[in-house]
Image: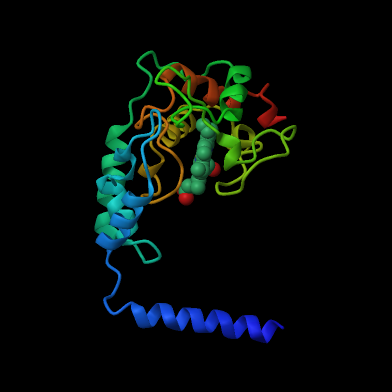
Amino acid sequence: MHKAIGIGIAAALLAGFANATEPVTDADVVATMKASFRERGIAKMDRLEQSDLQKQCSTWSGKQLPPDVKASLEKAAMESIVYPADNDYLGDWKEGEKIAQSGRGFQFNDTEKTVAGGNCYACHELSKAEIAFGTIGPSLYNYGKLRGGPTESVLRYTWGRLWNSHAFAACNHMPRFGAAGILTEQQLKHVMALLLDPESPVNK
Ligand code: HEC
């Protein structure tokens, strides 16, 4: 039984290769993607256009990023970071928890006015009370405690991470919450408090 299925799959694969006389190019892939997507609500086709950074990261995906490319992407990302003008980094961790929990915003069934969330739990463990979390990013449980509290350098590093994570790792998968205009400065301050306030469940 298994053997028969295996032979069937092998035959199908061979047939596929036999038909593919020309190698598949990047342009073929883009054309196929564009043909299979359609705009819906606020989600327009321009989402399929890659930024320069995305192009570079796709080009080098699975390979060692050349040091000069890595340095220039990280430099550009670092220069995009806007620190809070009032030098006040910490909002209310309770608001931060709501933002970390929310995956709303920029979806086809959202509107321009939908307040976006950070969806942090999709990729990170944060507080122990929330047991549904993804593991694409490292656990942030005890983040503030492990960093030794909200010193100036920890505040600036964490803010920079949230604003544009590519400043610290050119081709990583964390959204650019500040640089891409996903979260407002005030929302970022609340998320900062979630990570760094000693009273936050992240540090309990
Ligand atoms: C799509 C997945 C994804 C989402 C969503 C995401 N992150 Fe990340 N995050 C990552 C990845 C991956 C890394 C590690 C990047 C690297 O390789 O340096 C990271 C790194 C971090 C770091 C640095 C950790 C350290 O020890 O230096 C912080 C802080 C952080 N994320 C906070 C957040 C917060 C807060 C949110 C929500 C506002 C969030 N992340 C949303 C994927 C994500």
Residue drawn at (58%, 86%) of the image: 7
**Closest to the observer: 111 or 115?**
111
Is the N terminus in the top left, top right, bottom left or bottom right quadrant?
Answer: bottom right
Q: Residue furthest top?
A: 86
**Residue 195 in view:** no
Q: Quadrant of the C terminus?
A: top right
Residue 134 in the image, given as x and y percentages of width and height: 62, 45
Q: Is residue 51 left or right of residue 97?
A: left
Looking at the image, which is closer to me, 9 or 83? 9
Task: Name the foreground residue: 184 vs 1.
Answer: 1
Q: What colouring method underlies this structural image?
A: rainbow
Task: From the top left corner, tell me how far across and down residue 41 is, in percent.
Answer: 40, 29
Which is nearer the eye, 102 or 165?
102
Q: Position of residue 202 (x, y in %)?
A: 66, 31
Q: What residue is rendered at 46% in x and 42% in y?
A: 174
* Number of on-image labels: 0
Residue sitting at x 49%, y 32%: 154
Q: Is residue 10 left or right of residue 108?
A: right
Task: Name which quarter of the figure residue 86 lies in.
Answer: top left
Residue 194, can we see it? Answer: yes
Image location (x, y in percent) of residue 15: 43, 81
Is residue 150 positioned above or below 11 on the image?
above
Quarter of image, res 108: top left
